Image (tube, rainbow, N blue to C red):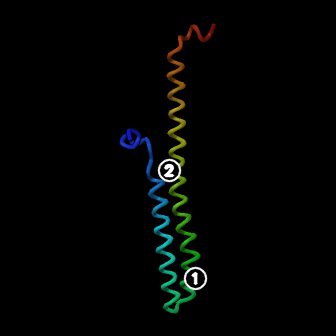
Amino acid sequence: MKRFFSFRMMVSSIIIKILYVLGVISIISYSVYQILEGSILIGISSLLIGNLAWRLICEGAIAIFSIHDVLVSIERKMYEEKQQYSNHNSRDMFK
């Protein structure tokens, strides 16, 4: 819980996955509606292109948050190494 309130844990990827499912359901519903209304070409193209575009958008957003996670872990490792280095006496390190 502490990680959640200190923004150490990102919930963005979970939200994006939920939005992806809702978007796919919406795109499929719209496509079926278009097909039933007689616009078969629009329905099929929106089904294929819409789902592909929506998938790319969601994957791009998740990639951005994944990059953030990697950068945070690198920063954490660098901080730990800096703390280790500063805790040692410099004379002891070069003996």
What number is the disc on residue 65?
2
Find residue 46 and report its horizontal and vertical position in percent.
Answer: 54, 79
Percent x, y of residue 36? 51, 89
The spot of residue 63 in percent (x, y) is 55, 53
User: How would you rate the neighbour count of disc 1 (Cα within 10 Å): few for under 14, some for 14-19, many for 20 or more?
Assistant: some
Q: Above or below — where is 36 with respect to 12?
A: below
Instruction: List the residue tagged with mark 1.
Output: 44
Q: Amino acid at mark 2?
A: Phe
What is the crowding at mark 2: few (fewer than 14 residues within 10 Å), some, or many (at least 20)? some
Query: Considering only vertical position in the picture, is 53 above or below 41?
Result: above
Q: Of 88 and 35, which appears nearest the observer?
A: 35
Q: Residue at x 43, y 41 (%)?
A: 8
Residue at 51% from the left image edge and 27% from the top image edge: 80
Residue at horizontal 51%, vertical 35%? 75
Element under disc 1: helix
Farthest residue to the bottom: give it: 38
**Image quarter in which the C terminus is found:** top right
Which image quarter holds the N terminus?
top left
